[in-house]
Amino acid sequence: MPIPGHIDPVPVARAFAPRADGRVDLLGLSKDDLRMALGTSQLEPKQAKLRAKQLWHWIYNRGVADFALMTDISKAMRPWLEQRFVISRPEVVETQVSTDGTRKWLLRSDANDAQGTQDYEMVFIPDADRGTLCVSSQIGCTLNCRFCHTGTMRLVRNLTPAEIVGQVMLARDALGEWPSQPEGRMLTNIVMMGMGEPLYNFDSVRDALRIVMDGDGLGLSRRRITLSTSGVVPMIKRAGEEIGVNLAVSLHAVTNEVRDEIVPLNRKYGIHELLQACADYPGANNARRITFEYVMLRDKNDSDAEAHELVRLIREYRLPAKVNLIPFNPWPGAPYECSTPERVRAFSNIVFEAGISAPVRTPRGRDIDAACGQLKTAAEKKSRAELDREAATAAV
Ligand code: SAH
Ligand code: SF4
C-alpha cells in the first residue's frame, strides 16, 4: 500500500544491498532476512539457520558487534563472516548532557550514503523510576507543524531499520546494559518522538520495533514503547495491527480552524477523522489508553473553553484517553510563546476534574535543545513563506 500524503522521495536501503566496502550490514535485518543473507553467502540452509540464531543472540542479546568475540562460532568461521558482513552502529558526532541528566546524541548517517552524510538526534531522559529513549524515525520532517523546530528542516530522508534499531543499540552501549536482562535496566521505555513522522516511514519503523520487541534479543515489551503521530489517519489502524505499541496522538487543538494552522496535516485529515481512527485503534482500552499530546501555546489553544471542548470530544468518541500537556519549548524564531503557568494549571484542572488524567510535562533537556520539538540538525532552513506554500500544496 502506498504511503499516503506528500513526502519527498526517500530512498531506503534494500535488504542485503552491500555497502561501499562490499559487505552487508546485518543490523536491522529481520530473523528471516538474516538467515537469507547468510544463505546467499553459500551457507547450507541448516548451517545458515544455526548461524543466524547464534548471530541474533550475539547482536541483540549481548550487544557484540565484532565477529572475533563470538566464542561459540568456530574460529575458522569468524574471518569468513568478517569478510562478508558487518554489524553497524550509527556514528556518534557529539554527546551533550543537560543539567537535569538528559543526554542528547548527534548521530551521522553512513558515509556511503549516496546523498552524503546527514545528521540526526536521539535523546535519553532518565527519571527515578524509568529511563526513556526518544528515537528519531526520519532526518527532518515534511510536516512543518508551526511550533516544531524539526519541521523547519528540509526532510532529507527516512531512516533505515538499521539506523532506527541502531539508536537503541547505541543507548545500550552507552549505558553499559549488555547483555539484555529484564530487570534493573536504565533504559526501560522507548518513545518514537524524536525527529520525523514515524507513520510516514512505516515499514522501517515497524521492522525496527519488531526487532526491539523480540524476546530473544533486546526484549522490550510493546507496553513500554509509544509511537507518536501527528495524525496520519490511514496508517493508524495498520500501526495497531502490525506494531501494536502504545499510541500517542499530537492533537494540540480542538477545532479544525486552529489545528489547520498549527498542524497543517489537519487540512488533509481533520480532527473528527483522526478521533474516529483513535476510537478504532486496535488494542486501545482502559488499561492501555491513547495519549493525546497538547502543546500549550499562549492565546492560541489554551483557553478554558478549549479545555472543556477537549473533554467533550474525548467523551463523544468514547476514547480511553489521557492527555499530556506539554509546555511549548521555544526555539530561535518560533512564532509562538508558551502559555503562562497559571493558564497551564487551569487547563489541566478542567481536564482532571472531568476524570481524565492531564499531567503537565516537565520540560527536559531544554538547555541542550533536547526537549520536545527542539531537535534540529544542520540542514538548509526553509523560509516561513516556503513552508506555508508547501503546507498549502500538501493539503490539496
Ligand atoms: N512527528 C511525531 C513525533 C515527534 S514530535 C508527532 O508530531 O507526533 C513529539 C512531540 O513533541 C509531538 O507531540 C510534537 O507535537 C511535540 N512538539 C513539537 N514541537 C514542540 C515544541 N516546540 N514544544 C513542545 N512540544 C513540541
Ligand atoms: Fe514533524 Fe512531529 Fe515536528 Fe510536526 S511535530 S513537524 S509531525 S516532527
Image (spheres, rainbow, N blue to C red):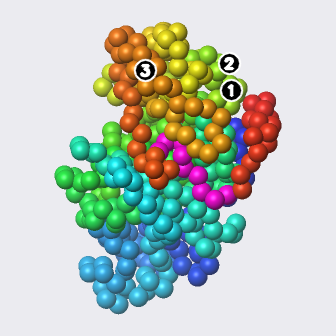
- Magenta segment, which residues? 371-379
Q: Is residue 392 magenta?
A: no
Quadrant assignment for the C terminus: top right
Comparing 194 with 163, the one in front is 194
Q: Position of residue 173 (x, y in %)?
A: 34, 66
According to the picture, the residue beneath numbered tag 3 turns out to be 342
Please tell me in which quadrant of the rendered image residue 130 appears.
top left
According to the picture, the residue beneath numbered tag 2 turns out to be 257
Quadrant assignment for the N terminus: top right
Q: Is mark 3 within 8 Å of ligand 1?
A: no
Secondary structure of the residue carrying numbered label 3: helix
Write the residue at 68% across / 25% down. Answer: 260
Does the image show residue 4?
no
Left-right relation of 177 to 311: left
Structural distance between the alpha carbons of marks 1 and 3: 25 Å
Q: Amino acid at mark 3?
A: Glu
Q: Is mark 1 within 8 Å of ligand 2?
A: no
Structural distance between the alpha carbons of marks 3 and 2: 25 Å
Q: Does the CB distance between marks 1 and 2 fall below 8 Å?
A: yes
Structural distance between the alpha carbons of marks 1 and 2: 7 Å
Does the image show residue 375?
yes
According to the picture, the residue beneath numbered tag 1 turns out to be 261
Q: Would you say the magenta stretch is mainly helix, strand or loop?
A: loop
Considering only vertical position in the picture, is 5 above or below 206? above
Q: Amino acid at mark 1?
A: Glu
